[in-house]
């Protein structure tokens, strides 16, 4: 028996050790022990992934679930603080708006791509130009405000903007800021690396078996010290949440992220697992078509919001794992505003009074829309029970996400309210522009927001001072909540389970984990 | 080798298979198109403009009439090109070549278990018809038929994988890379799939054997002094072999269908998981390719069964 085999057997719990030893007596003698039984566990971080990636090329993929894969192979120009999502240096060591329409990035020195070519200003120019102009790019809209990219010197990049846009640094912490190796694409912006990504990230890509596994090995020349914390990474694609939890419970993976909130209670009861939880930008909310019938009246919209006990909503629908949402951002976010949050209250009596004042004292029936999954239906039942107390009735008509939201926001505009969620954007100004601007897709009635709203959002994109930006965004949020243009309900929490040997793993506000600092020991 | 009658039967069966294949793939294609949801929206990403979505529809030919889309797929399929996954871009033939053996490995494992356990149980029950062993086997097989295999799968995982840690809870190892590891990983899924198979084989074998053993022909065999064991194994089993073959061929097809659920429970990268995920994402080339592979498998299994019938009972090919 090899030393390695002995080590593994000695590390097993007593009962299992006896069983394994007994079973092995014959098999091992013949040298036939299954390799999988003794698979090297030491330095491979195994993750349960919840969807097959749509692509491993940051510019061509489409799914929000891809980031968890992409972060391993690519670094972004800008990074963020995990707890608040405030921007911090990434591949760009620093940046500065020299005037509202000029953004200058200074790059980290001595960074190379995994193919050995240097990362420099020319590479950044290639990437940003590819993202904004290549026919294959899915992210043209993210970087639409960039008019020109210039490599000023080897480590300086100057962006000329078509309009002031201080949201750009955080936009460049997302797909648009993931730097791919131009050499690996043969310097052809129309080529793609969907199945063979090459970036500057902590692991170099090794393999992708569809629906099964994506793996990488340590990139020895990575520029961050001590990164990655583990030699190899494997993300096993297991879409089903219950199977995902079992895979970490049985120790076949080290981390299962984005579990269902209701699984937290299960994780708590499993002594061999550590729970990692925290708020995300994902907010359950009701979208309101303010151009339809009774909902044209702001008092009715307000009454619908005031009738909801959000604390109870979190307890009932999320097993208490979450926080009530009083605005479109979670409390931990740098742009969260206490004044704006105060505008949303729980006051059933006040809600009834508002309904009467608006002429609906005898009751109101609404056309409600939603999704058919179990969690959605539970949220719907809770809301109906609360609204019944102020005389609002209705029945949710449910359809799959694409169909229900397509009909509610698109040309048809069916339904008064849609119970759905806002998944968040890296920069909050995008959230406000997308949710309430008159022409925005997510404003189903295409109703103009209150006076001063657009100016406040624009102001937030003209300043690069974080507290000034937060103040401008708070004004926008107060105006939106004052007119009750949507009804936020609760913040979804990241629920991750990790085996006991996982260290330095933390959840982040974006809800898309990064593994570069994780260690096993 | 095959005699002329058998060859004629084989030809006839192959010709009959063509409309079955067309009907199966066409109806799955139309069902998939009837489902709400649009793969172009998925492909276009989170902040997509409607122009981008339209552009993607054109790139993938999703804007063409449905019959044209199906016709194009079928024409390419005839030439061996099952086209590429809309989402990952991988050739569907590559995907199938990877996942199909995994599924067949588990299905074969389950069938072997069904036969190895089911046949002795059936023999035992039939030889002691009405006795205690018979009643126990019949009770057990009623339970086996009644329990859904995904439930059995869950219980097996909790008891044998999570509590006792004797088997892995999820995952799969390719039999080509590590045969013993593959057996280790596939045991729980195969047992879950085999539960109803064992029950079915035991029940069917018992009832046909009891009937045969009570016939006058067998009374004569006893009367001429043959020991019971010879009567049962040599004459009894041969008499019910056609019935047994029917049960097993139906079992293969049913087990193949049951993998759709069991593979999801065990996170096995097989046909079932592939079909479920591709359907959820409206990735129709993958669904079509997988359905085609399943249909061909079922047809082949039936064909083999038909050929074996005529070997076991030569009168069949003469009819």
Image (tube, coloured by chain):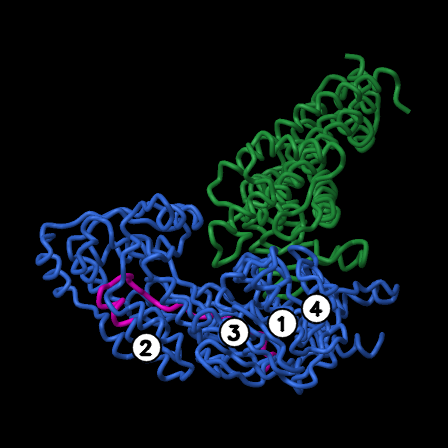
- Residue B317 in picture, x, y percent from top left: 80, 17
Residue marked by disc 3: A160
Tell me which corner region of the image, top left, top right, bottom left or bottom right, holds residue B64: top right
Identify the element where label 1 is drawn: helix
Earlier sequence position, callout 2 versus callout 3: 3
Q: CA distance from mark 2 to mark 3?
A: 24 Å
In this view, A271 is above or below A283 = below
Could you tell me which chain the residue with mark 2 belongs to?
A
Residue marked by disc 2: A472
Residue marked by disc 4: A182
- Residue B105 in picture, x, y percent from top left: 74, 47
Residues marked 1 and 2 touching at CB (< 8 Å): no
Identify the element where label 3 is drawn: strand
Q: CA distance from mark 2 to mark 4?
A: 38 Å
Q: Residue at x 71, y 23 (%)?
A: B212
> Residue A238: within the magenta?
no
Do we see residue B117 in this rendering? no
Q: From which residue to which does the magenta span run? A: A477-503
- Viewport quadrant of the N terminus of chain B: top right
Mark 3, Cα crowd under 10 Å, few <14 / some 14-19 / many 20+, is: some
Instruction: Identify the chain drawn in blue.
Output: A
Residue marked by disc 1: A125
Mark 2, Cα crowd under 10 Å, few <14 / some 14-19 / many 20+, is: many
Do we see residue A474 in this rendering? yes
Earlier sequence position, callout 1 versus callout 3: 1
């Amino acid at each position: 028996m090899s030393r390695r085999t002995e080590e593994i057997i000695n590390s097993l719990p007593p009962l299992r050790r006896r069983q394994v030893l007994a079973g092995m007596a014959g098999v091992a003698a013949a040298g036939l022990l299954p390799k999988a039984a003794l698979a090297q566990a030491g330095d491979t971080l195994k993750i349960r992934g919840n969807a097959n990636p749509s692509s491993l090329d940051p510019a061509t993929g489409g799914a929000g679930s891809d980031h968890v894969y992409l972060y391993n192979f690519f670094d972004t120009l800008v990074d963020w603080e995990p707890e608040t999502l405030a921007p911090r240096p990434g591949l760009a060591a620093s940046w500065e708006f020299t005037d509202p329409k000029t953004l200058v990035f200074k790059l980290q020195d001595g960074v190379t791509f995994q193919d050995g070519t240097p990362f420099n200003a020319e590479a950044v120019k290639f990437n940003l130009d590819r993202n904004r102009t290549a026919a294959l790019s899915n992210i043209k809209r993210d970087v639409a405000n960039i008019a020109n990219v210039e490599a000023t010197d080897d480590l300086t990049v100057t962006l000329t903007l078509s309009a002031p846009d201080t949201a750009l640094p955080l936009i460049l912490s997302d797909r648009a800021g993931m730097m791919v190796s131009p050499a690996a694409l043969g310097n052809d912006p129309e080529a793609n690396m969907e199945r063979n990504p090459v970036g500057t990230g902590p692991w170099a890509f090794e393999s992708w078996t569809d629906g099964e596994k994506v793996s990488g090995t340590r990139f020895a020349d990575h520029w961050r010290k001590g990164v990655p914390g583990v030699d190899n990474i494997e993300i096993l694609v297991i879409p089903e949440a219950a199977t995902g939890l079992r895979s970490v419970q049985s120790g076949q993976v080290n981390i299962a992220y984005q579990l269902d909130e209701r699984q937290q209670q299960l994780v708590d009861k499993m002594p061999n697992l550590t729970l990692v939880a925290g708020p995300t930008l994902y907010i359950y909310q009701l979208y309101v078509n303010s151009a339809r019938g009774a909902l044209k009246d702001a008092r009715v919209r307000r009454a619908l919001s005031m009738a909801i006990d959000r604390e109870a909503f979190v307890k009932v629908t999320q097993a208490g794992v979450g926080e009530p949402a009083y605005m479109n951002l979670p409390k931990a976010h740098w742009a969260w505003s206490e004044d704006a949050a105060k505008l949303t209250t729980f006051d059933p009596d006040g809600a009834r009074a508002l309904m009467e004042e608006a002429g609906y004292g005898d009751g109101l029936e609404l056309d409600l829309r939603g999704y058919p999954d179990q969690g959605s239906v539970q949220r719907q039942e809770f809301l109906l029970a609360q609204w019944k107390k102020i005389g609002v009735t209705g029945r949710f008509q449910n359809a799959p996400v694409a169909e229900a939201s397509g009909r509610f926001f698109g040309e048809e505009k069916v339904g008064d309210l849609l119970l759905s969620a806002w998944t968040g954007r890296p920069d909050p100004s995008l959230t406000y522009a997308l949710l309430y601007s008159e022409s925005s897709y997510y404003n189903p009635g295409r109703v103009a927001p209150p006076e001063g709203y657009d100016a406040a959002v624009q102001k937030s994109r003209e300043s690069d001072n974080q507290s000034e930006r937060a103040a401008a965004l708070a004004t926008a949020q107060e105006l939106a909540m004052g007119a009750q243009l949507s009804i936020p309900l609760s913040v979804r929490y990241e629920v991750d389970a990790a085996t006991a040997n996982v260290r330095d793993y933390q959840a982040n506000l974006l809800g898309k984990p990064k593994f570069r600092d994780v260690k096993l020991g | 080798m095959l005699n002329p009658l058998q060859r004629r039967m084989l030809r006839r069966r192959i010709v009959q298979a063509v409309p079955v294949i067309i009907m199966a793939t066409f109806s799955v294609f139309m069902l998939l198109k009837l489902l709400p949801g649009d793969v172009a929206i998925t492909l276009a990403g989170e902040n997509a403009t409607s122009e981008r979505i339209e552009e993607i529809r054109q790139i993938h030919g999703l804007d063409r009439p449905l019959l044209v889309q199906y016709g194009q797929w079928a024409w390419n399929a005839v030439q061996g090109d099952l086209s590429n996954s809309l989402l990952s871009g991988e050739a569907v033939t590559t995907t199938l070549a990877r996942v199909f053996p995994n599924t067949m490995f588990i299905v074969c494992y389950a069938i072997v278990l069904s036969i190895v356990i089911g046949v002795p149980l059936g023999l035992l029950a039939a030889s002691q018809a009405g006795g205690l062993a018979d009643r126990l086997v019949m009770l057990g097989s009623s339970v086996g038929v009644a329990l859904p295999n995904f439930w059995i799968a869950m219980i097996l995982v909790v008891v044998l994988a999570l509590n006792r840690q004797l088997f892995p809870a999820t995952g799969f190892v390719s039999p080509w890379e590590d045969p013993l590891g593959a057996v280790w990983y596939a045991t729980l899924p195969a047992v879950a799939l085999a539960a109803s198979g064992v029950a079915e084989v035991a029940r069917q074998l018992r009832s046909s054997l009891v009937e045969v053993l009570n016939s006058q022909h067998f009374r004569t065999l006893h009367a001429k002094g043959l020991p019971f064991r010879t009567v049962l194994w040599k004459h009894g089993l041969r008499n019910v072999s056609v019935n047994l073959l029917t049960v097993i061929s139906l079992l293969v097809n049913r087990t193949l269908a049951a993998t759709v659920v069991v593979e999801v429970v065990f996170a096995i990268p097989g046909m079932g998981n592939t079909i479920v995920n591709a359907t959820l994402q409206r990735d129709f080339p993958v669904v079509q390719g997988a359905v085609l592979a399943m249909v061909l498998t079922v047809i082949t299994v039936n064909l083999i069964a038909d050929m074996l019938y005529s070997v076991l009972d030569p009168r069949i090919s003469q009819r």
